[in-house]
Amino acid sequence: MATDQTMHGVPPSLSARVVGSFAYLTVRDRLPTILTKVVDTIHRNKNKFFEEYGEVGIQAEKQAISLLSKLRNELQTDKPVLALTDGLPDTDSWNQYLERQQRLQGDQEPVSWFKSPWLYVECYMYRRIHEALLLNPPISDFDVFNEGKTQSFTESSQAVMSLCTYLEGIKNNIDELSKNPLFEHFSKLMQVSLWGNKCDLSISAGQENSQKTSPLDSLYSLLPFILVDDTKRVWSALISAQRPRESGKNNADRVDIVLDNAGFELVTDLVLADFLVSSGLARQIHFHGKSIPWFVSDVTAKDFQWTIRQAMATNHKWVSKCGVQWQRYLKEGMWCYHDHPFWTQPHEFCDMAADAPDLYTTLQGADLVLFKGDLNYRKLTGDRDWEHTVSFETALRGFGPATLCSLRTLKANIQVGLQPGQGEKLTSQDPSWMTSGKYAVIQFHNPKSE
Ligand SMILES: O=P(O)(O)OC[C@H]1O[C@](O)(CO)[C@@H](O)[C@@H]1O
Ligand SMILES: [Mn+2]
């Protein structure tokens, strides 16, 4: 049996097996910290559970905490990864994935936290957190990450106001704008959405991480930190979408946004989506979120609805106007929200066509798919130890349901599609360039043109 290392000449998965690597430090330090915070959050909500469910709520709180403490112990002592027992629709698929990992790893050692692919064990931890709550019915629906997500939104209120005010300004004369200024606005809002990805809560192990200043003011000074900028290619894809349109224009029919974090980042994505629709660059937007709480700050359906309601209720003319508009887009079907279970599984995206063919077919209906954030980039590239000069296309390993673009700030030590020498130069200037969130890429791929 081929091991992961030798499989078809593809580089090995990043793993905590490499002592001192970012994966190692994450599994050793960051993940246990996140688990400790989860336990603390549940404990702090004890009274609430009692008020809502009485003694049963308290029992559930205790039991969930005990399962989570056990999980933290398994992780810290590098115990074998266990099969899930909660009988959810995706349980079998997770357990089959465990068997698959075991086959790839060979029979010598069990799949475990420090020996197996980082992407897999990190996803698995979030699925086990979900299991710990799910097995304790009255509190099954409790989102342990909710507080941090709502806080990130609230603390970014200044930035949200300036962004919505900017959008209102564009929309005021959007019909008169010629191509050039429209492109300028598009490019700016892509960058705002890109840098919005700095505000995730997983990399900071749940520490407050919001946007305090106007995101538009700093765009120019941040330009040198965008290592790959394919904005023009994304623009061309939007204005010359493949399918002919009744209007005679060839603008895109549908753009899909695979969301990442709630809080400020989600607002930047909603503003970009609003701009795409109101400028006529796209007719519909399909958002893809997570069906369970994921990687601390990722968007769930609840977060999505909450954010829009919150915007509507904000005491600021342009923020509330945006909120009302977004609600209307949803009601009228120009926007819709999906949460396929594949997004909360550990697969590399090159497995999607085989393992989630329905989702792959759904994405094929888009003219452009925007993938937000670092975790999506890790899944696009398989979270493997690629050379920096390997092309994005090679790293995608055949994944290409539609024209796609990744908007990602670098928070894991993987980056492809760089110029020869670029990675080495960055390493000498700033050794943490791949993990600090200071650098970013807007990286595009058109499966039909290569
Ligand atoms: O929200 P994002 O951009 O996907 O970032 C989350 C990142 O933080 C980390 O969880 C840190 O371990 C990475 O695994 C992950 O890539
Ligand atoms: Mn995230």
Image (cartoon, grey):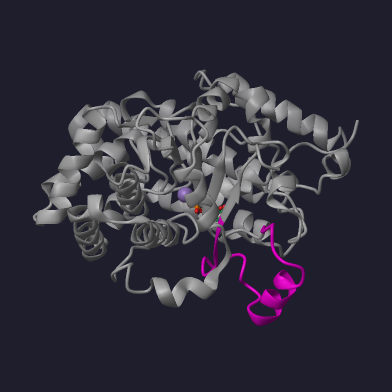
* Nearer to me, 305 or 88: 305
* Nearer to me, 385 or 360: 360
Q: Residue 23 magenta-drawn? A: no
Side of 182 relative to 75 (left or right): left
* Nearer to me, 112 or 157: 157
Residue at image location 34% in from the left, 61% down from the top: 181
- Residue 35 seen: no
The image quadrant of residue 143 is: top left
Q: Quadrant of the N terminus?
A: top right
Counting from the top left corner in percent of width and height, residue 189 is at 37, 58
* Nearer to me, 21 or 280: 280
Counting from the top left corner in percent of width and height, residue 416 is at 69, 57
Q: Which residues are magenta?
A: 414-442
Tally of marks: 0
The image quadrant of residue 329 is: top left
The image quadrant of residue 289 is: top left
